[in-house]
Structures are given as structure tokens and as C-alpha cells.
């Protein structure tokens, strides 16, 4: 949201290939999605668009008017100048945009155009009733950092308090990684925008920064400037990993502030109160729950620099640091696995070593994934399998020779493949895990 709306569109040029070009088709998994609103009855359809040319002109103009109304209110967006129709289309839809429409809309972008054409004879379709909201996804930075994305969200006037923003946020988290992005940043969310903050807190975004006095908002008294929150979140996690991260972050938030997350229900409030008995917070410059010091700033004396999880507030379960972020979990497991350069530790040893100092759910699963992806271990196991195949082949040959002159049993042609079969068994995933220990 911080770029000049009149500047040329940025496209992703870093991260995983292929890189998108103007007019490219969307990835196949991104398809129109039927959703149910908060009342559990009303259906809506979220329709993706890859360019402004796909969006009917009347719908584009309606969304422009809605955004201009938000800009005029002056309490959610930083811009002060209204968009023209020519400027709005490229700004909102040049990379990727999605629109939520009421009902079960078939046919995707083509279906939306047909809606406009069929409504034309009756004086035009009423987008005020039909359109519930829209969001976009685009790079947050240019060039080498363009795999980090940003999103803008707009809920229309008639769709407030129906769960539209939350549903669009959930789809944003699913679709952004499919577009090649690995991290999302929301540069500027005014802390007075309570509805937006509640959504991002609930969807596992972290408050990675704060800009004091950032907003000179129209709704605030003269001379009163509002802070802005910077949100960040990794993309593409498995659901269980994202759920674990969200749970630990909410425990940390409760311990740090003494307040419940805005969307916590009574059951979660009970769980958070109970968590105080088991969890503590080590704050940099403060200490456990603000009483004693205890942050190492991310340095590493333990294990020759393996202690990489420091820096920032630490959630502790007993004397173990809780690691909520899956990427950090993987990195810690990888470091301990590779601690000895000559002989990498196996699954059980690595799991035990990590568990002495850190806590997260499914540590052994993370360690197994690390070892399966270890190039050095894979190379060693390949050599072992080839050596086993050679030994088995030699034994088969010796058996054949023994059958001719040494009283040994003659091996049939079908049995001569036994050595290769043995090697392939050794190289299966399950046996691989045992050999890696």
C-alpha cells in the first residue's frame, strides 16, 4: 500500500520460477471458490482475475468508488487523492485481484462478464447488492525481494459485519503461496482499525513492527497522530503447523499484555489462563514475564553456535524455549543434525538433542524431514545401497560357481536378481530412516 499508485506495476522476479508476465494465466489450482458467510446460510463466490482487462468496466468502476469512499473517510488508507478509473484498474488488478460476489457464480471471470451483459438490458446489474468485497496480491518490494508480497482489502458498504474480510484473508493465505510468494507484509495497519487488526491477529500474522505517530487521520482530533502496525507472516505452511504457530503466538500475546486476543472465545480464554501455570515469557531487556533478565539476542554459545533461536521475546515451557515458527524449527533441527561435519546425527539422536533445549509439537517429524533432505546423507546411503548390491551380486556369482564345482546349489536365472532386489529394499524410505540413525 505504500507505493505510488501511478508508478508502473511490479512483478515477481525472485523466488521460485516461473516468473509471471503481464497477461499470464493464473496457476491451475487458483479457481473460483464458493464460500458461506457468517450467517452460515448465505453463499458467495470469490473469483480470481489476472488483469484489469478481465474485470467488467461497471464492476471496476463500482470498486473504484468504494475505495475512493474509504480514502475520503481518511481512517484506513494513507492516500488522500481519489483514483480515476484509468488509474484504479492497473493499481488493483495488474498482478492479481479477486472479487467476492453474492451467490453461487459459475464460469469464473467469463461468468462475471455474462452477468454484466445480461443485466445491461435491464438498466445494468446492481453491483451494490451483488459485490461484497475485493483484494489484491502484489510484490511488496522490487527485484530480488519481490517474492515477498503485500495485499490490499476492501469490504463494500453493504457487506460489513458479515465475515467477508475474514474469508478473503483466509483465501489470501491460500492463494498467495500458489502465486510464488513466501512471505507477506502489511506495511501499514492503523491501530485504530480494530476490525482489520483482529483479522490479522486471528490468522497468525505477527506484529513485526510499529511506526509511532504514523497516521494523521481525518477521524482523530487535530494534532493527534495514530501508530501503525506492521504485520508479517510466512506463507505456505501446513495447516497443523499454522495452527501450532497461532496457538503459541496467542499464549505469548496473553503473557506479554495480560489481555485476551480480540477474537478469543470463552474456551480459549480458559486455555490461556491455564497456560500461565506452564508457560513463561522471557523479554529482552526485561525477563520472565517482565521480572528477570534472560535474552541472549540470538547469539550462540551452546553447541558451537547452534543456538539460533534467540532474539526477541521468548516463550518458555519450563526450561525449554518454545519455537512456534516452522522455518525456525527446521533450521534448528538441521543445525543439530549437521553439528558433527564428519558424521551427521541420526533421527533419534537429533530429536533427543533438540528436545533437551527446545519445544514444539512433532519435533521428530521435523528432524525426519531434515534428514530426508540432507544431500550428504543421501549420497552416503546411495553408496551403501550400491555396495550392498555389489556384495549381493558377488554372493550370487559365488553360489553359481559353487554349484558347478563345490557342492553348492545352482541358482536359477530368476534368483540372480536377488542382490539388486536387496539393494532396492535398502533404499526404500522406511529403511532409509533406520539406516540414518
Image (cartoon, rainbow, N blue to C red):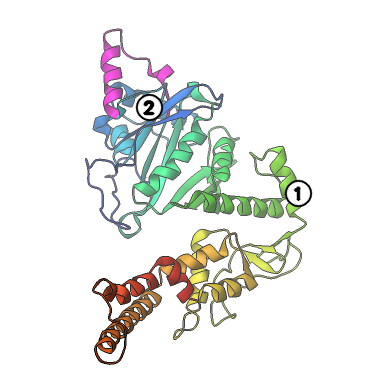
Question: Hey, which quadrant is residue 143 in on the image?
Answer: bottom left
Q: Is residue 124 above or below residue 85?
A: above
Q: Is residue 331 above or below residue 25?
A: below
**Residue 97 located left or right of residue 296:** left
**Residue 111 located left or right of residue 183:** left
The secondary element bearing badge 2 is classed as helix
Magenta stretch: dominant SS?
A: helix
Which residue corresponds to the image point at 63% horizontal and 38% vertical from the top-left? 263
Question: Can the viewer see residue 252?
Answer: yes
Q: Would residue 123 be counted in the magenta stretch? A: yes
The answer for how far apart the CA atoms under marks 2 and 1 are is 43 Å
The secondary element bearing badge 1 is classed as helix
**Disc sitting over residue 273 in the figure:** 1
Q: Would residue 95 be counted in the magenta stretch? A: no
In the rendering, at what x and y percent does residue 236 appear?
43, 51
In the rendering, at what x and y percent does residue 227 appear?
57, 46
Q: Which residue is mark 2?
A: 63
Amino acid at each position: 500500500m505504500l507505493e505510488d499508485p501511478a508508478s508502473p506495476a511490479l512483478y515477481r522476479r525472485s523466488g521460485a520460477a516461473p516468473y509471471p508476465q503481464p497477461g499470464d494465466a493464473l496457476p491451475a489450482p487458483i479457481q473460483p471458490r464458493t464460500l458461506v458467510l457468517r450467517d452460515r446460510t448465505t453463499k458467495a463466490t470469490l473469483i480470481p482475475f489476472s488483469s484489469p482487462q478481465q474485470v467488467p468496466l461497471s464492476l471496476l468502476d463500482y470498486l473504484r468508488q468504494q475505495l475512493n469512499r474509504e480514502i475520503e473517510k481518511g481512517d484506513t488508507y494513507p492516500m488522500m487523492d481519489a483514483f480515476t478509473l484509468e488509474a484504479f484498474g492497473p493499481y488493483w488488478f495488474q498482478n492479481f485481484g479477486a472479487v467476492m460476489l453474492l451467490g453461487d457464480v459459475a464460469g469464473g471471470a467469463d461468468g462475471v462478464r455474462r452477468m454484466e451483459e445480461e443485466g445491461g438490458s435491464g438498466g445494468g446489474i446492481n453491483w451494490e447488492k451483488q459485490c461484497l468485497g475485493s483484494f489484491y496480491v502484489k510484490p511488496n518490494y522490487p527485484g530480488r525481494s519481490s517474492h515477498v508480497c503485500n495485499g490490499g482489502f476492501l469490504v463494500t458498504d453493504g457487506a460489513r459485519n458479515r465475515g467477508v474480510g475474514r474469508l478473503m484473508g483466509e483465501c489470501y493465505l491460500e492463494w498467495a503461496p500458489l502465486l510464488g510468494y513466501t512471505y507477506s507484509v502489511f506495511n501499514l495497519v492503523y491501530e485504530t482499525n480494530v476490525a482489520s487488526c483482529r483479522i490479522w491477529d486471528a490468522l497468525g500474522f505477527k506484529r513485526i513492527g510499529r511506526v509511532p505517530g504514523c497516521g494523521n487521520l481525518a477521524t482523530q482530533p487535530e494534532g493527534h497522530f495514530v501508530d501503525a502496525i506492521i504485520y508479517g507472516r510466512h506463507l505456505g505452511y501446513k495447516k497443523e503447523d499454522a495452527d501450532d504457530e497461532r496457538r503459541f503466538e496467542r499464549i505469548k500475546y496473553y503473557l506479554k499484555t495480560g489481555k485476551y486476543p480480540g477474537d478469543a472465545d470463552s474456551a480459549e480464554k480458559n486455555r490461556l489462563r491455564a497456560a500461565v501455570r506452564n508457560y513463561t515469557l522471557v523479554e529482552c531487556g526485561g525477563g520472565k514475564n517482565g521480572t528477570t533478565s534472560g535474552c541472549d539476542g540470538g547469539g550462540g554459545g551452546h553447541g558451537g553456535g547452534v543456538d539460533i533461536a534467540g532474539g526477541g521475546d521468548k516463550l518458555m515451557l519450563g526450561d525449554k524455549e518454545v519455537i512456534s515458527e516452522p522455518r525456525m524449527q527446521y533450521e534448528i533441527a538441521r543445525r543439530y543434525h549437521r553439528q558433527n561435519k564428519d558424521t551427521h546425527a541420526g533421527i533419534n539422536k537429533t530429536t533427543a538433542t533438540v528436545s533437551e533445549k527446545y519445544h514444539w509439537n512433532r519435533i521428530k517429524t521435523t528432524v525426519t524431514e531434515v534428514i530426508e533432505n540432507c544431500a550428504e546423507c543421501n549420497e552416503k546411503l546411495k553408496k551403501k545401497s550400491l555396495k550392498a548390491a555389489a556384495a549381493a551380486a558377488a554372493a550370487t556369482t559365488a553360489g553359481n560357481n559353487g554349484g558347478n564345482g563345490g557342492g553348492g546349489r545352482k541358482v536359477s536365472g530368476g534368483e540372480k536378481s536377488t542382490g539388486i532386489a536387496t539393494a532396492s529394499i535398502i533404499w526404500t524410505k522406511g529403511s532409509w530412516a533406520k539406516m540414518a540413525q
